[in-house]
Image (tube, grey):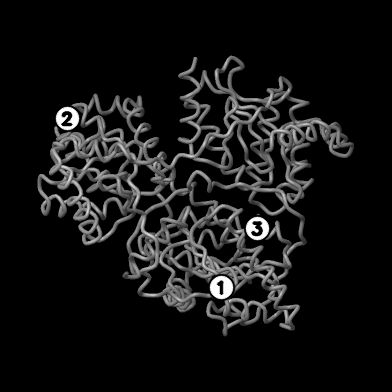
Amino acid sequence: MPIAKRRLLVFLLMLLTACFGGPKGNTAVTLEPKKEGPGLAVDPSRGEPPRVAMTDDADSPVPVFANDAQEGERTALVTIVEFSDLECPFCSRAANTLEALRESFGHDEVRIVWKNYPLDFHAHARALAEAGAGVNELMGPQAFFRYQRAVFEAQSRMQAQGGFNDDSPRRLAEAVGADGRVIEDGLRDRRWAPRVERDIELGRKIGVSGTPAFYINGVSLGGAQPLEKFKAVVTEELAKAKALVAAGTARDRVYVAASKASFKAPRDDDDDEPVDTATYKVPVDGSPARGPKTALVTLVEFSDFECPFCKRIEGTLQQLRTIYGDKLRIVWKDMPLPFHKRALPAALAAREARAQKGDAGFWDMHDRLFDAQPKLEDPDLLAAAKAAGLDEAKMKRALAQGTHKKAVFADEDAGDDVDAAGTPHFFVNGRRLMGAQPLDKFRELIDVELKKAEALVATGISPEAVYTELQKTAVLKTKPVEHKAVALDPKAYSRGPKTAKVTIVQFSDFQCPFCKRAEPTMDELLKAYPKDVRIEWRNLPLSFHQDAELAAEAALEAGAQKGSAGFFKMHGLIFDGHGRPDGLKRPALEGYAKSMGLDMGKFGRALDGHVHLASIKADQATAQAAGISGTPGFVVNGTFISGAQAFRKFRRVIDAELAKK
């Protein structure tokens, strides 16, 4: 089996979130977290602040060089080498997981080493990488990791402004104290390009094809996996490393010895890899389709108008239509990914085109939207509508009112039911095919399914009934719903009307990066359900987050002085300060309190006397009784949602609850 196919199958089984397609542009798919893989912090033991050693481990199969940016001791028993892209949203998510991981195991046990792997389709990733290499060279690894965090924090902010621009690398380097002129000169002269190229070549050599990619003492782990997955691998490697030390290996040679034992070089032939032979239940009724209902093969496409890989695959799909003619039907399903901010409006525009001109109108707008990518702002959508001969006033109204959201949401739910977590994602008569695959991959699967369909027709089943017949034995991938009993607390601070039909009890930690990530989703829910959703806050500071408890006390004191508005004002200030050095320390909390006009005498006495600690302990006891040990955790009218999930995960539960009323 060719290596490309082997990697695809491995990723189908293993990856939760990743940007695919290396600097040479391999088969690609844009992925997002699976149900079990959102950000989630759990409560382990506390460690000490990291120290950094700069020494070569060049004789490892995954070498670490003295000038690599790294956090932690060279004598750490576990080294995690990360191949990453500063413009990749999944790499940003993984950075928070790695931070929690090192805190879990103690900073002397785990070392993190950064390798640059900028992907071609991220326009500014290489310049950001070179600027980062410059920061590391000029100011050291601690400054580099401040730069890394600054870049990752800027991702969502810059996306709203059209993404990174040519000035971003210099400005972000300046933000951590680098001399902007030196950085700019270095970028112009490609001063740090060889450092980045070295990382890229190493990644290619050892089989990296997407970001983020990790090697844990040589063990490969791909994608922005959940914390528990990392912990499992690190725990296993830690045991092996301790055995090496017990056998006489010096601690500063453990990484080389362990990685030589564990690393597996990529192979060109892996026929023993399992193939997903399942047929999945994918409804097609009511969806836009190209091709007749009598087609023996139905190809369902979950796609996103802002996804570059979805655009790339359109030419292949057109070739398939030419090759198979009336034997192939292509059915569209919307799967706008949450970090593609214009994907949903584009989907709504295509749906409105269908409402006005049927499936022909949909596919015409579909083609125009992909041609326009990445220009998908409202004026661009309206221009496409005008060019397509649509009623512009109706289009404008549909975009403003979200007229067709329910249809898009139904597609998202259908995708979740079969674990179609990334785009593009295909099901050929129910058989999964993931990513912007080459033509031959599609033909291989279509030909197999075509023979099966022809055999069914030979038994007397009509061509238009073939897909329905295959779906009778199809499977879903949905997980059992988890319920938790948590009584509402009338004294808890909350947002949303008290008469809301749905209450979300939110267990959170002010120092948890995943809790911060969940906040925009909470805001979005309140905006989407202004009358029907109420969010009740509960404090669950984890023991390894040293500043979380005091931050919770500060927020509660703000609430005591200024009510719910005061609590949530302090709540916002604390999360805003989350990424800054000492942003949650006592002086910072006092600064927030002063900016709010709180009584500073009362504020100081409340923190000194731990006036609100009993309330925090009560929340922790409630969480423990319900079996909630990580943050963030949400109980939605009794249904438990774990981690920083996407909006649609909450929306589906909320809509089901509202339908009961």
The amino acid pointed to by label 3 is: Leu
Q: Kindly identify the residue that appears in the image at 82 percent across and 32 percent down.
A: 612
What residue is shown with label 3? Answer: 101
- Nearer to me, 484 or 112: 484
Q: Earlier in the sequence, mark 2 or mark 1?
A: 1
Q: Residues within 10 Å of mark 2 (few under 14, many from 20)?
A: few
Q: Nearer the viewer, mark 3 or mark 1?
A: 1
- Nearer to me, 149 or 174: 149
Q: Kindly identify the residue that appears in the image at 16 percent across and 29 percent down.
A: 357
Q: Residue furthest front?
A: 459
Q: Is residue 547 shown above or below 171? A: above
Picture coordinates of residue 19, whole percent (x, y): 42, 58
The amino acid pointed to by label 2 is: Gly
Q: Earlier in the sequence, mark 3 or mark 2?
A: 3
Q: Which quarter of the figure is the N terminus placed in?
A: bottom left
The answer to whether marks 2 and 1 mark residues whose Cβ atoms lie closer than 8 Å is no
Dot 2 lies on which element?
helix
What residue is shown with label 1? Answer: 218
Q: Kindly identify the residue that appears in the image at 14 percent across and 42 percent down.
A: 457
Residue 172 has which mark?
none
What residue is shown with label 2? Answer: 358
Q: Is residue 105 shown above or below 352? A: below
The amino acid pointed to by label 1 is: Gly
- Nearer to me, 605 or 547: 547
Q: CA distance from mark 2 to mark 1?
A: 54 Å
